[in-house]
């Protein structure tokens, strides 16, 4: 039985290869959460990919071939991501873009590493994602850097000494970011009054708020995704607690949709700000806004992700996944919308981070922190 | 006794109750089992729902190794009431996380069966009853691991325990209530009446026939008591009848003039009548139970007869058996009757004292004799009187002609023959002729007297009955006795003191005065004679005369009492017999008192009796009817 299925699989693989070449298209996969709890934040990222692929095809595709984007839904779960990755491999893609959340990306990474197909995540910042293997890359900075940036901001700019940390127990991202924040904060005379884990699907955070009330830290570090971050901030403010929050790149203007102006005044770090004065940035914003009304800061990362792939293919002059990976690995000073990207040995870019603040219904630039 | 009944009934109640309890338990057990199964099923559904809800998250958390998240999740799941512990395992059965140390790696072979579905089984958790729920965590076709949940059955057990306790206490309360109420009812309705009946019947059995026994209840026990009452009344009546009969028989037995002694086959006395008591001086109570020979030694020689009577079943008779008693010969008829009724062996000995009868027989003979003497005398008297009269007249004339000097015929005849009258007279006196003539006359008179007395036996005419004052009659006779007899018989009647004790206003009595006087005279004469002969220092003879009227019987009662020597009983009984006399032959005829008796009883319809105490005196009692009986 096993032997038979192996033969059948091999036959299909051969057939696929021949079909691909015959159609003159390059198949790429995008794995994002189109459904589920993560969909709200994922859709803009997926839009960024679509926008970039479209632009790439308008420029004549890759090596004379049109790029075909195959979209897979990871159903907002790591498991779903793994299954989606397996489907993508079956679809014979040369590269995969995604996912947004570190948990999802981590699950996918193991599949693609095993299949030796390169994968670039636009915004999964957890360090472990790229540590899975040499086929895994990302377009964003990593949390060990981001956590340090945020802690440093709290200590140096906000001059705060005590903090409480709220962690999404389901999220690798949340966990990793919290870890690096705490590490730096403690190392600079900061005091972590409490660490509190919560489950991703939680909607009632009263026990958490009770804890805040008890410990009364100067600042609350909330490395949460947009939905739970919105809930927590809203419920905390509703409980008349005005302690400021600070969060990571998972935050976005979407928080206004969830918590309204309750989020005003809180800080968060990000990869890029659309009001950046960089030439490439302004061009992208202009182009992007022709297609989409709302521009999310993370869309730029998606855009960069696709063009990192394009750059590698051009340099490799091959559509073989292994060749693409090799080219990707040696990417140097790629001029992206979000900044210049060079991969280190882990496949992580060395990039600056920005500190933003919710102010008057939008996020405003506070400062840039270089690595 | 009543305790036994109570135990038995209580035992019956407890056995009945245990059977009921057994049946209840038999019904209850499967019901409990079913309830437990239902509870287990609903717990399984609850746990299935719980794990189903978090299945996706659990799957992802295992997949993603989110141990912190799992930990929090398990804590949250733990909040579901009843969950004791939750363990999560990876797909190889390796233990991942739990809130309890109880979980160890699962042997994957053992849980093969739960790969497809959830599984629930009873298992103890830290010593408490619980269910172990196992389920595979799979999502989107991925088998990621297992979850095991211990769910407490403590509540269920508690419920079971409580329901068992309630059920048990209910049964026990029912039992207690049954015991108490039934005992009370039993006590009131059965035991108390039965005890009452027992006491009452016992009292009746002990002879208290007046014991109230009817409880007047309207149930069976009431009827029973009513029946007892009827029974008691019947017994009472029977006993009363019996006692009447016994009394009657006893009276009959006692009133028998014979000595009656009942004996059994061993000659032990069973019956003893009054006469027997009189004869022996032993009361019935003392005699019954003694041996015949012991209680009645005179009957010692009758024992053989008793045995014979019992053996032959024939009456044995020993007539006119003579025996000496206080110096007197007495005659007894002894009859032994065998008792053969109702299988009771024994005999009745009857002893009849026939001494009196024999005496009476003799007396009858004498009376007959006397009457025939009377008849003879009546005939003879006439025949004797005429020649006697001739004799006496002749003697008188003879005496007159021999002694009367004045008589002219005498003087003339004497002259004629030449003898002087004085000479004749002197001759006569010297030859005692005159005295002889006088003796003829006296003897003639005496014969006339005897004849006259004898005639009185024959006379039954009451032609001479007139009303008499007995006081007068008595006084006259006293005078007569004082003047007449003392000369003749040498009785110093005047020396006798006469005490009269007469009731005043005594009625006249119809009687033959002369005869009554004769009776009085007889008595006085006998008394005077007796007192005359009574030698005693400082002796002052006296008569006490009493006359009284017995208004009730309308009889005149007379008593003539002396303080003479009295008579012994033997004599006393015979004083009225004709020809009985204590005087030497020739002195008395022995007819005086018998004639008196005859006069009072036969001629006057009265009564005459005598009482005497030797050495004290004798009292004659005469009662005469005041109205003549036709």
Image: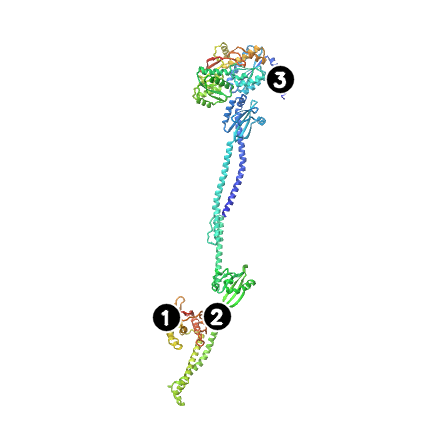
Residue B533, position as x, y percentages in the image: 41, 74
Can residue B620 be seen here? The reply is: no
Q: Which residue is mark 3?
A: A10
On the same chain: label 1 and label 2? Answer: yes
Can residue B334 be seen here? The reply is: yes
Q: Which residue is mark 2?
A: B359
Q: Chain of mark 1?
A: B
Q: Which mark is residue B500?
A: 1
Residue B44, position as x, y percentages in the image: 54, 29
> Relative to residue B594, is residue A71 depicted above or below?
above
In the rendered structure, are the residues bearing label 1 and label 2 in contact, judged by CB atoms less than 8 Å apart?
Answer: no
| Residue at mark 1 to residue at mark 2: CA–CA distance | 36 Å
Return the residue nearer the eye: A344 or B602.
Answer: A344
Q: What secondary structure is found at the residue carrying circle 3?
A: helix
Return the residue nearer the eye: B180 or A36.
Answer: B180
In the rendered structure, are the residues bearing label 1 and label 3 in contact, judged by CB atoms less than 8 Å apart?
Answer: no
Residue A6, position as x, y percentages in the image: 62, 19
Label 2: few (<14), some (14–19) or many (≥20) C-alpha neighbours in 10 Å: few
Of mark 1 and mark 2, the one earlier in the sequence is 2
Q: Chain of mark 2?
A: B
Q: Quadrant of the C terminus of chain B?
A: bottom left
> Relative to residue B233, is residue A30 depicted above or below?
above
Q: Is residue B510 left or right of residue A200?
A: left
| Residue at mark 3 to residue at mark 2: CA–CA distance | 173 Å
Q: What secondary structure is found at the residue carrying circle 1?
A: strand
On the same chain: label 1 and label 3? Answer: no
């Amino acid at each position: 039985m096993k032997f038979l299925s192996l033969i059948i699989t091999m036959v299909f693989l051969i057939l696929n290869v021949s079909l691909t070449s015959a159609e003159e298209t390059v198949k790429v996969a995008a794995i994002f959460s189109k459904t589920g709890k993560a969909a709200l934040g994922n859709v803009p990222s997926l839009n960024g990919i679509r926008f970039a692929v479209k632009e790439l095809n308008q420029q004549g595709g890759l090596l004379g071939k049109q790029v075909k984007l195959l979209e897979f839904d990871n159903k907002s779960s790591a498991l779903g991501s793994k299954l989606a990755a397996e489907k993508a491999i079956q679809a014979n893609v040369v590269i995969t873009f995604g996912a947004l959340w570190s948990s999802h990306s981590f699950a996918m990474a193991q599949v693609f590493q095993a299949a030796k197909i390169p994968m670039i995540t636009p915004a999964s910042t957890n360090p472990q994602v790229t540590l899975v293997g040499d086929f895994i890359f990302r377009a964003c900075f990593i949390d060990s850097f981001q956590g340090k940036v945020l802690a440093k901001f709290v200590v140096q700019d906000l001059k705060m000494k005590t903090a409480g940390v709220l962690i999404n127990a389901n999220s690798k991202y949340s966990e990793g970011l919290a870890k690096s924040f705490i590490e730096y904060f403690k190392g600079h005379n900061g005091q972590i009054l409490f660490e509190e884990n919560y489950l991703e699907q939680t909607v009632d955070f009263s026990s958490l708020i009770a804890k805040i009330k008890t410990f009364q830290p100067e600042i609350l570090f909330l490395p949460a995704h947009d939905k739970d971050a919105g809930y927590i901030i809203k419920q905390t403010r509703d409980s008349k607690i005005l302690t400021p929050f600070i969060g990571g790149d998972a935050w976005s203007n979407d928080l206004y949709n969830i918590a309204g102006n309750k989020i005003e005044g809180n800080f968060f770090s990000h990869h890029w700000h659309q009001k950046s004065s960089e030439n490439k940035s302004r061009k992208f914003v202009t182009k992007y806004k022709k297609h989409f009304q709302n521009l999310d800061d993370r869309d730029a990362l998606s855009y960069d992700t696709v063009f990192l792939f394009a750059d590698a293919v051009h340099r490799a002059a091959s559509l073989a996944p292994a060749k693409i990976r090799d080219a990707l690995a040696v990417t140097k000073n790629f001029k992206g919308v979000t900044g210049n990207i060079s991969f280190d040995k882990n496949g992580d870019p060395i990039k600056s981070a920005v500190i933003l603040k919710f102010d008057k219904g939008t996020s405003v630039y506070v400062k840039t922190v270089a690595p | 006794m009543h305790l036994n009944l109570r135990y038995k009934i209580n035992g019956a109640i407890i056995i009945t109750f245990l059977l009921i309890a057994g049946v209840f338990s038999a019904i209850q057990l499967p019901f409990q089992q079913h309830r437990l199964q239902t509870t287990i099923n609903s717990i399984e559904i609850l746990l299935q729902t719980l794990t189903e809800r978090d299945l996706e998250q659990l799957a992802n958390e295992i997949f993603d190794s989110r141990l912190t998240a799992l930990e929090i999740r398990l804590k949250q799941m733990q909040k579901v009431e009843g969950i004791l512990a939750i363990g999560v395992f990876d797909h190889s059965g390796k233990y991942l996380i739990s809130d309890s140390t109880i979980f160890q790696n699962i042997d994957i072979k053992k849980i093969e069966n739960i790969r497809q579905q959830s599984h629930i089984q009873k298992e103890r958790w830290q010593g408490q009853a619980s269910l172990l729920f196992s389920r595979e965590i799979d999502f989107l076709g991925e088998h990621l691991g297992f979850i095991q949940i211990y769910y407490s059955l403590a509540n269920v057990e508690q419920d079971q325990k409580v329901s068992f306790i309630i059920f048990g206490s209910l049964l026990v309360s029912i039992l207690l209530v049954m015991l108490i109420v039934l005992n009370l009812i039993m006590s009131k309705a059965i035991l108390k009446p039965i005890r009452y009946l027992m006491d009452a019947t016992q009292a009746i059995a002990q002879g208290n026939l007046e014991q109230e026994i009817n409880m007047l209840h309207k149930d069976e026990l009431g009827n029973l008591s009513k029946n007892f009452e009827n029974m008691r009344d019947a017994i009472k009546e029977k006993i009363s009848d019996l006692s009447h009969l016994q009394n009657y028989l006893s009276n009959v037995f006692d009133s028998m003039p014979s000595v009656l002694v009942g004996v059994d086959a061993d000659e032990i006395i069973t019956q003893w009548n009054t006469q027997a008591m009189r004869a022996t001086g032993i009361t019935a109570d003392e005699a019954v139970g003694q041996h015949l020979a012991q209680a009645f030694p005179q009957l010692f020689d009758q024992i053989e007869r008793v045995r014979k009577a019992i053996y032959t079943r024939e009456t044995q008779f020993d007539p006119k058996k003579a025996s000496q008693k206080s110096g007197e010969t007495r005659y007894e008829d002894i009859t032994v009757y065998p008792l053969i009724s109702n299988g009771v062996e024994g005999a009745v000995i009857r002893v009849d004292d026939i001494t009196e009868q024999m005496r009476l027989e003799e007396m009858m003979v004498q009376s007959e004799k006397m009457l025939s003497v009377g008849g003879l005398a009546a005939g003879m008297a006439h025949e004797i009187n005429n020649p006697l009269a001739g004799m006496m007249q002749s003697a008188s004339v003879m005496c007159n002609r021999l002694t009367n000097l004045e008589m002219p015929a005498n003087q003339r005849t004497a002259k004629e023959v030449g003898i002087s009258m004085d000479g004749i007279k002197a001759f006569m006196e010297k030859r005692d002729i005159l005295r002889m003539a006088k003796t003829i006359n006296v003897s003639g008179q005496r014969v006339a007297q005897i004849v006259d007395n004898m005639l009185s036996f024959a006379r039954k005419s009451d032609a001479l009955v007139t009303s008499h004052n007995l006081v007068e009659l008595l006084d006259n006779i006293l005078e007569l006795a004082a003047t007449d007899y003392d000369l003749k018989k040498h009785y110093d009647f005047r020396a006798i003191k006469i005490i009269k004790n007469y009731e005043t206003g005594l009625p006249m009595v119809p009687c033959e005065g002369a005869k009554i006087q004769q009776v009085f005279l007889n008595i006085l004469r006998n008394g005077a004679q007796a007192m005359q002969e009574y030698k005693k220092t400082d002796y002052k003879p006296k008569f006490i005369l009493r006359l009284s009227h017995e208004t009730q019987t309308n009889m005149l009662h007379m008593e003539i009492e002396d303080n003479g020597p009295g008579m012994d009983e033997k004599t006393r009984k015979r004083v009225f017999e004709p020809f009985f006399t204590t005087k030497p032959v020739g002195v008395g005829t022995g007819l005086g008192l018998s004639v008196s008796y005859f006069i009072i009883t036969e001629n006057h319809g009265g009564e005459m009796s005598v009482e005497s105490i030797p050495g004290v005196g004798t009292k004659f009692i005469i009662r005469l009817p005041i109205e003549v009986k036709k």
